[in-house]
Image (cartoon, rainbow, N blue to C red):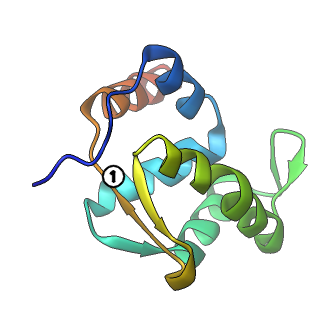
C-alpha cells in the first residue's frame, strides 16, 4: 500500500481535526479504507450525524455539499489526506496513522 500522505505537523493535524464536519467525513473514509466514496454518501452521513445544524450552521444537503466541495474536501486534499476527484464526485482516503490516532483520542474524550 502506497503512502500518499505527506508528513503533517501537529498544528496541521489539529486544524484538520478541529472541525466536526471533517471529523465525520474522515471517520467514514477511514471505515471505507482506500475505497472510493461518493461525495453524496459523505453529504448524507454529515447530515445524519449532525441533525439540523453543525455548530451554528444549518445542514441541509445542499449546504453541506457546498461546504464539502469548497472548504473541507480541498483542505483535506491539500494536506494529502484524501484524493478528491471533483469531476467524478468521489473521494479516497490515504491512511495517516497520526491523524487516525488523534481522531480516536478525540472520539474517546467525546
Question: In the picture provided, is 27 more to the left or to the right than 22?
Answer: left
- Please give the residue where the numbered disc 1 appears in the rendered image: 30
Furthest residue toward bottom: 88
Instruction: Classify 54 as above or below 83.
Output: above
Query: Could you say which is closer to the camera, residue 72 or residue 107?
Result: 72
Crowd band around label 1 with a 10 angstrom C-alpha radius: few (<14), some (14–19), many (20+): some
Residue 110 pos. (x, y %): 53, 26
Instruction: Classify 73 as above or below 87.
Output: above
> Residue sitting at 28 percent across and 70 percent down?
35
Question: In the picture provided, is 30 more to the left or to the right than 85?
Answer: left
Residue 11 pos. (x, y %): 52, 16
> Residue sitting at 59 percent across and 45 percent down?
75
The quadrant of the picture occupied by the N terminus is bottom left
Furthest residue toward left: 1
| Number of disc labels | 1
Q: Quadrant of residue 34?
A: bottom left
> Residue sitting at 48 percent across and 19 percent down?
109
Residue 85 pos. (x, y %): 48, 73
> Residue sitting at 59 percent across and 26 percent down?
15
Query: Could you say which is closer to the camera, residue 102 or residue 12?
Result: 12
Question: In the picture provided, is 83 more to the left or to the right than 58?
Answer: left
Q: Quadrant of residue 58?
A: bottom right
Query: Could you say which is closer to the camera, residue 51 or residue 81?
Result: 81
Query: Could you say which is closer to the camera, residue 16 or residue 55?
Result: 16
Residue 99 pos. (x, y %): 37, 31
Instruction: Classify 37 as above or below 67.
Output: below
Dot 1: element: helix
Question: In the picture provided, is 53 more to the left or to the right than 95?
Answer: right
Amino acid at each position: 500500500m502506497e503512502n500518499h500522505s505527506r508528513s503533517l505537523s501537529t498544528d496541521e493535524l489539529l486544524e484538520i481535526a478541529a472541525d466536526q464536519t471533517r471529523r465525520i467525513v474522515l471517520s467514514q473514509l477511514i471505515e471505507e479504507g482506500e475505497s472510493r466514496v461518493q461525495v453524496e454518501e459523505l453529504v448524507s452521513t454529515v447530515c445524519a450525524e449532525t441533525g439540523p445544524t453543525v455548530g451554528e450552521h444549518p445542514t441541509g444537503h445542499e449546504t453541506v455539499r457546498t461546504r464539502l466541495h469548497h472548504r473541507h474536501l480541498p483542505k483535506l486534499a491539500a494536506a494529502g489526506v484524501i484524493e478528491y476527484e471533483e469531476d467524478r464526485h468521489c473521494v479516497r482516503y490515504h491512511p495517516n496513522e497520526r491523524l487516525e490516532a488523534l481522531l480516536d483520542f478525540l472520539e474517546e474524550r467525546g
